Amino acid sequence: MATPINSRSLGRTQFSIRDELQLALLPTVVVLVVLVMLEMFSSQRLLFSSLPSSAFLIYLAPDHRTNRMRTLLLAQVAAASVGFLAERLIGPNYWAASLAMLLTIVLMVSVDAMHPPAVSTALSFAFRGRKPVRCCCLAWPSVWWWS
């Protein structure tokens, strides 16, 4: 086991560079697999934008309530749904994105599932346009990650 180095500036225990890089490896691999899946199934690169932020938060503080499976899944699924519906009802524009962002924040606060990268997910879906998206390719890595 790695010997932690106390780091007050980060507000968490910091490990050696080698150990920190090893901790970051799995979230990075998961994000890269999701990128490949998105490219293969939907060519919607914009939908990928919030996932690296989620991976980095998981690496930085895996035990924080923002990074729990319930929080991450509720927030990301709600954000994708809200963004998708806003785009379908209003069209891929700033009004849809604004509505999606506001509703996502309200939903996350209401169900106590705050995961900040989910707001980017809502925006991505609201701006995505009429190109079809196979949303199932977004869900499987999350299920795989915590199984």
Image (cartoon, rainbow, N blue to C red):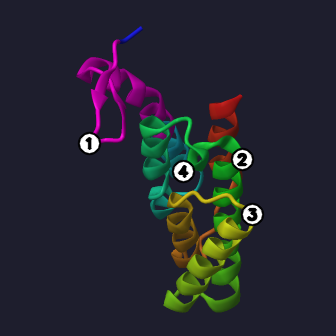
Separation of disc 1 and disc 4 at Cα?
37 Å
Nearest the eye: 3 or 143: 3
Q: Which mark is residue 38?
A: 4
User: SS of the residue at dot 3?
Assistant: loop
Dot 4 amino acid type? Leu
The mark that comes first in sequence, 1 or 4, is 1
Residue under pointer 1: 9
Dot 3 amino acid type? Val
The mark that comes first in sequence, 4 or 3, is 4
Residue under pointer 2: 70
Q: Residue 13: horizontal and vertical position, in percent? A: 37, 29
Identified at 46% across, 63% down, the residue is: 46
Residues at badges 2 and 3 in contact (C-beta under 8 Å)? no
Separation of disc 2 and disc 3 at Cα?
10 Å
Q: Is residue 92 visible?
A: no
Magenta-colored span? 3-31
Residue under pointer 3: 111
User: SS of the residue at dot 2?
Assistant: helix
Please give left or right for residue 6 compared with residue 43 in the image. Answer: left
Residues at badges 4 and 3 in contact (C-beta under 8 Å)? no
Closer mark to the observer between disc 2 and disc 4: 2
Identified at 65% across, 59% down, the residue is: 75
Separation of disc 1 and disc 2 at Cα?
29 Å
Tell me if mark 1 has few (under 14), some (14-19) or many (20+) residues whose alpha carbon lies within 10 angstroms of its own.
few
Q: Residue 28: horizontal and vertical position, in percent? A: 42, 35
Tell me if mark 4 has few (under 14), some (14-19) or many (20+) residues whose alpha carbon lies within 10 angstroms of its own.
many
Tell me if mark 3 has few (under 14), some (14-19) or many (20+) residues whose alpha carbon lies within 10 angstroms of its own.
few
